[in-house]
Amino acid sequence: MAFAILSDDTKSKLEQERSRLMEERGSIIQAAVAQATAEVDQMLQHLNQLLGYGTDASAEDKSPIAVGNPKSEQRSKRASRPASKTGATIQKASKKEEAASASQQQPLESVPKAEAKSTSKATAAASQSTSTKTLTLKPEFQSVTPSEAVRQILQQADQPMATEDVIPALYQSVEASDLSTARKSVALILGRGTHQGIYEKVEENPSRYQFKE
């Protein structure tokens, strides 16, 4: 019943919006993941600065490292046992040490495979990190997340802003190759903020938003 009372113009716009979202669904999800990763990394960096850690350090790096080798401690305990132990006990200890030594010997062929998997994962992570680092926030927004920066921009704006208006106000400079990523990131922030009641969409084609008082 709700669909039946829509005007033809509204139906047409909704169909266009639906088609666009279906076509760009994958890229929007990727942009969302990249945006969330950038926000978490930036927040961790801010917390590290407040806590006095290095810029590349994390709180986990400051946790105490467990000292001691269980096998070495086990050997020490065996060495400290009285010499009056029976021959059967000594023989059992010797068999346990042989079994532990055999378990540590891994086939050489498994090492290159593990290294190859680790290298591929590191390469994928580095490529994703590079794609997000190309978009640099302006100096006044370096200490806040991109979502908070967009909130400040729209809150101070004199008139509704479109995605194309927010991009130059948010980022220092955007290369042509990164423009699509910037549009998706800003559109995602605006859409999420509208759903949360922070912004209000006041125009269509192009969509324009204003801070909701």
Image: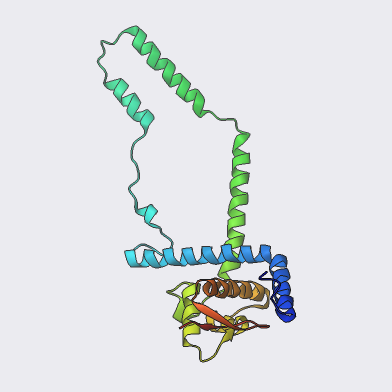
Which of the 4 image quarters holds residue 72? top left
Give the image location of residue 12, x and y in percent: 74, 77
Query: Split into 4 quadrants, where in the image is the N terminus?
Result: bottom right
Between 152 and 91, which is closer to the camera in this rendering? 152
Q: How many marks?
A: 0
Left or right of 10 in this view: 195 = left
Can you name the residue that lies furthest to the top here? 87
Can you name the residue that lies furthest to the bottom here? 158
Query: Split into 4 quadrants, where in the image is the C terminus?
Result: bottom left
Between 181 and 9, which is closer to the camera in this rendering? 9
Residue occupying image coordinates x 63% and y 50%: 120
Between 213 and 148, which is closer to the camera in this rendering? 213
| Vertical order, 151 against 34 (above or below) | below
Between 15 and 146, which is closer to the camera in this rendering? 15
Residue occupying image coordinates x 68% and y 74%: 177
Give the image location of residue 64, x and y in percent: 32, 48
| Vertical order, 143 against 118 (above or below) | below
Give the image location of residue 10, x and y in percent: 70, 79
Instruction: Report if residue 172 is visible in the image.
Output: no
Left or right of 134 in this view: 27 = right
Residue occupying image coordinates x 73% and y 66%: 23
| Vertical order, 49 against 10 (above or below) | above
Residue occupying image coordinates x 39% and y 13%: 92
Left or right of 38 in this view: 93 = left
Which of the 4 image quarters holds residue 16? bottom right
Give the image location of residue 204, x and y in percent: 65, 83
Give the color scheme: rainbow, by chain, secondary structure or one colour.
Answer: rainbow
Instruction: Report if residue 16 is visible in the image.
Output: yes
